[in-house]
Image: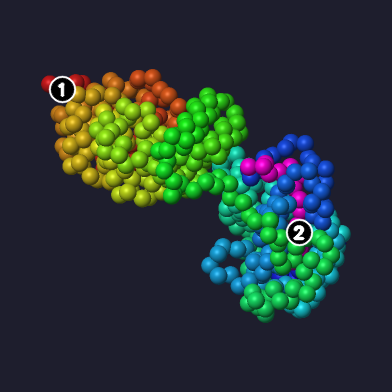
C-alpha cells in the first residue's frame, strides 16, 4: 500500500479505454449496458468500435485530480496531457498543478520515452500494476458522473463531454457538501510546492527522443488522421444558397424527421433523429429546437436556439422576411424560425440578457401581430418584472378584451401597481380569480411548482396556473404588497 504525507508528493497517471461508452460513425457517444471486452490502451487499435478514452492525473494524498476525454481514434499525446495538468494555472479552472516529486505510471501505459522525459523533469517514476494501487477507482466515478450528465445534455461528442468537466469537478472535488479534495490539496502543499513546469517548448523537448519508441500510446504527436471531431454542427451555414431546389428538398426531408421525432417517447431516439436531420440539412431550425428542449442546461440550450435562429433565417431568405412580415406564422415554413426565436429569447431572459430578450419578443409581435405563440403573455410578464409599466399598459390596452388567466392576472397586477387595492384593481383581481382559482395557491407558495412545466393545459386548470406562475411570479414578488393583497382576495365584484 502506498502512503503519502502531503500534496504533490505523488501523482498517479491513468489512461483507460471505456467498456461502456463507444462512439458512433457520426461521432456521437453511446452507452452500452453490457460491458465490452477489456481493451488495453496499448491494444486500442484492436477495438471493434471507436471507444471513449479517459486521461486522468490524480494527487494521491488529497484525491484531487484533472482529467480529459478522448477516443481511440483521437488520442491525446501523453506529454501534452502532462503539460496541461502541471503547467502553472493561467486562469483556467484546474484542481491541481505543479510537478510532483514522484509519478506513478502503470505498466499498461509505460514506455522508455515516457520514463526518460519524466526523469529529465526531476520526477521519480514508480511502476505499480494496474488496479487499485494506480488509483483506478476514480475512473468509475468519472464515468458515472458523465453518464448522469449525458441524460441532461445533448452534445454527446468527445468535445461535449470535455465541456462537462467542470460539473464533474464540482461534484467529485470542489464540493461544498462533502469532503473538498481541492481545499485539502491546497492546504497541504509543503514549502517549495507547487513546482512550476518549464515552458511548453522545453517541456516537450524532454520527451521528443522517446516518441513512438514502443508502438504504444502517442507520446508527443499524433498521426495526421487522428483529429478531434465535433459533429453536432459539422456543416457550415454560410456561403451557400439555402433556397436552391436541392437544399430545400433536403430541408424538407430533415423537417419530416423532426415531425417523427416529436412523436417518439424515448429521448435517445428523439436525439438520434434530430442529429440525423442536421446531417441531411444544417438549415433545419427545428432540429436545433428539439435538441435545445432536451437539454437541462440553459447555456447549452441557448447556444442551440441561436443556431436554430441562424439556420431558420438562412432557410427563409431575406425576401420572405419582407414578404411575410405581419402574417408570419400563417406560412408553415416560417414556424421553425419562430420556435427557435422564442426559445432564444426565453434563454436570454433566463441568463440575464434581458434587454436583448425583450427586443426579440417585440420583434416576434411585429412579425406576427396575431401572436399564435402567446408571445404577448411572456412579454407582459417580462415588462412588469423590469418595471416597464408604461409599455406593459400599452400591451394590456391592445388586448383589452382578453380575459384569459395569463392576461387577467397580469392586468390585475398592473392596476394594483397604479392604484393599490382600489376599486378597479379589485374588480380585475376578481375577474382573474374567476378565470383560474388555482393561481393564488402557487403564487402564495401553498403548493410547490413542479420541476418542469406541464406540456399542455385546460382553461382554469392547475396546469394553466403552474404555467402562469412559473413565468409571472417575479413580477408579483417585485411588487410591494401585491402578494398580501392577493392573499386577502375574497372580494366581491364592485360596481
How far across and how far down the image is residue 140, in percent? 73, 48
Q: Which residues are magenta?
A: 11-26
Residue 289 visible at all:
no
> Magenta part mainly helix, strand or loop?
strand
Marks 2 and 1, how far apart at CA: 75 Å
Residue pictured at 67% horizontal, 69% vertical = 83
In terms of image quadrants, where is residue 309?
A: top left
- Tag count in the figure? 2
Q: Describe residue 107's horizontal placement relative to residue 481 as left or right.
A: right
Tell me the tag on residue 125.
none
Is 105 drawn above or below residue 361 in the view shown?
below
Residue pictured at 60% horizontal, 44% vertical = 156
Question: For the residues carrying marks 2 and 1, which lies nearer the camera in this image?
Answer: 2
Residue 24 visible at all:
yes
Residue pictured at 66% horizontal, 72% vertical = 98
**Is residue 15 within the magenta segment?**
yes
Q: Nearer the viewer, residue 312 or 266?
A: 312
How far across and how far down the image is residue 108, in percent? 84, 58
Q: Which residue is mark 1?
A: 494
Tell me the tag on residue 14.
2
Q: Describe residue 121's horizontal placement relative to residue 236 as left or right.
A: right
Nearer the N terminus, badge 2 or badge 1?
2
In terms of image quadrants, where is residue 416?
A: top left
Element under disc 2: strand
How far across and how far down the image is residue 462, in percent? 40, 23
Count neighbours of disc 2 (C-alpha within 10 A) and say few if under 14, some if 14 to 19, many if 20 or more: many
Is 443 drawn above or below residue 92 in the view shown?
above
**Is residue 143 within the magenta segment?**
no
Q: Nearer the viewer, residue 265 or 211?
A: 211
Color theme of the render = rainbow
Q: Say which quadrant the C terminus sits in.
A: top left
Q: Say which quadrant the N terminus sits in.
A: bottom right
Amino acid at each position: 500500500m502506498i502512503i503519502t504525507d502531503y500534496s504533490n508528493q505523488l501523482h498517479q497517471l491513468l489512461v483507460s479505454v471505456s467498456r461502456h461508452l463507444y462512439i458512433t460513425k457520426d461521432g456521437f457517444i453511446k452507452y452500452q449496458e453490457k460491458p465490452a471486452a477489456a481493451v488495453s490502451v496499448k491494444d486500442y487499435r484492436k477495438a471493434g468500435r471507436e471507444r471513449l478514452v479517459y486521461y486522468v492525473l490524480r494527487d494521491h494524498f488529497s484525491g484531487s485530480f484533472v482529467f480529459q476525454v478522448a477516443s481511440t481514434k483521437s488520442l491525446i499525446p501523453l506529454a501534452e496531457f502532462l503539460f496541461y495538468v502541471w503547467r502553472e494555472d493561467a486562469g483556467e479552472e484546474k484542481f491541481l498543478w505543479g510537478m510532483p516529486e514522484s509519478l506513478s505510471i502503470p505498466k499498461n501505459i509505460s514506455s522508455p520515452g515516457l520514463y526518460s522525459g519524466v526523469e529529465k523533469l526531476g520526477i521519480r517514476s514508480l511502476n505499480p500494476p494496474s488496479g487499485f494501487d494506480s488509483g483506478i477507482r476514480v475512473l468509475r466515478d468519472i464515468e458515472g458522473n458523465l453518464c448522469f450528465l449525458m441524460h441532461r445534455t445533448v452534445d454527446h461528442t468527445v468535445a461535449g463531454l470535455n465541456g462537462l468537466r467542470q460539473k464533474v469537478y464540482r461534484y467529485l472535488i470542489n464540493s461544498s457538501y462533502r469532503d473538498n479534495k481541492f481545499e485539502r490539496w491546497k492546504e497541504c502543499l509543503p514549502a517549495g510546492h507547487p513546482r512550476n513546469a518549464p515552458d511548453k517548448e522545453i517541456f516537450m523537448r524532454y520527451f521528443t527522443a522517446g516518441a513512438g519508441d514502443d508502438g504504444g500510446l502517442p507520446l508527443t504527436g499524433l498521426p495526421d488522421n487522428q483529429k478531434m471531431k465535433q459533429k453536432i454542427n459539422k456543416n457550415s451555414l454560410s456561403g451557400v444558397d439555402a433556397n436552391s431546389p436541392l437544399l430545400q428538398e433536403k430541408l424538407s426531408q430533415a423537417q419530416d424527421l423532426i415531425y417523427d421525432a416529436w412523436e417518439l417517447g424515448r429521448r435517445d431516439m428523439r436525439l438520434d433523429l434530430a442529429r440525423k436531420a442536421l446531417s441531411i440539412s444544417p438549415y433545419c431550425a427545428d432540429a436545433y429546437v428539439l435538441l435545445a428542449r432536451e437539454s437541462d442546461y440553459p447555456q447549452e440550450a441557448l447556444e442551440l436556439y441561436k443556431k436554430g435562429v441562424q439556420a431558420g433565417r438562412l432557410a427563409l431568405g431575406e425576401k420572405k422576411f419582407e414578404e411575410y412580415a405581419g402574417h408570419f406564422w400563417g406560412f408553415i415554413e416560417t414556424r421553425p424560425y419562430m420556435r427557435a426565436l422564442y426559445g432564444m429569447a426565453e434563454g436570454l431572459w433566463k441568463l440575464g440578457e434581458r434587454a436583448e430578450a425583450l427586443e426579440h419578443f417585440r420583434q416576434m409581435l411585429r412579425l406576427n401581430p396575431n401572436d399564435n405563440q402567446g408571445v404577448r403573455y411572456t412579454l407582459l410578464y417580462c415588462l412588469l418584472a423590469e418595471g416597464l409599466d408604461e409599455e406593459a399598459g400599452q400591451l394590456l390596452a391592445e388586448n383589452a378584451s382578453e380575459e384569459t388567466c395569463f392576461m387577467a392576472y397580469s392586468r390585475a397586477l398592473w392596476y394594483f401597481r397604479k392604484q393599490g387595492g382600489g376599486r378597479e384593481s379589485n374588480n380585475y383581481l376578481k375577474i382573474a380569480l374567476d378565470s383560474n382559482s388555482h393561481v393564488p395557491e402557487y403564487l402564495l407558495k401553498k403548493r410547490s411548482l413542479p420541476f418542469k412545466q406541464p406540456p399542455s393545459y385546460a382553461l382554469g386548470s392547475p396546469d394553466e396556473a403552474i404555467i402562469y406562475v412559473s413565468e409571472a411570479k417575479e413580477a408579483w414578488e417585485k411588487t410591494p404588497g401585491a402578494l398580501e393583497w392577493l392573499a386577502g382576495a375574497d372580494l366581491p365584484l364592485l360596481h
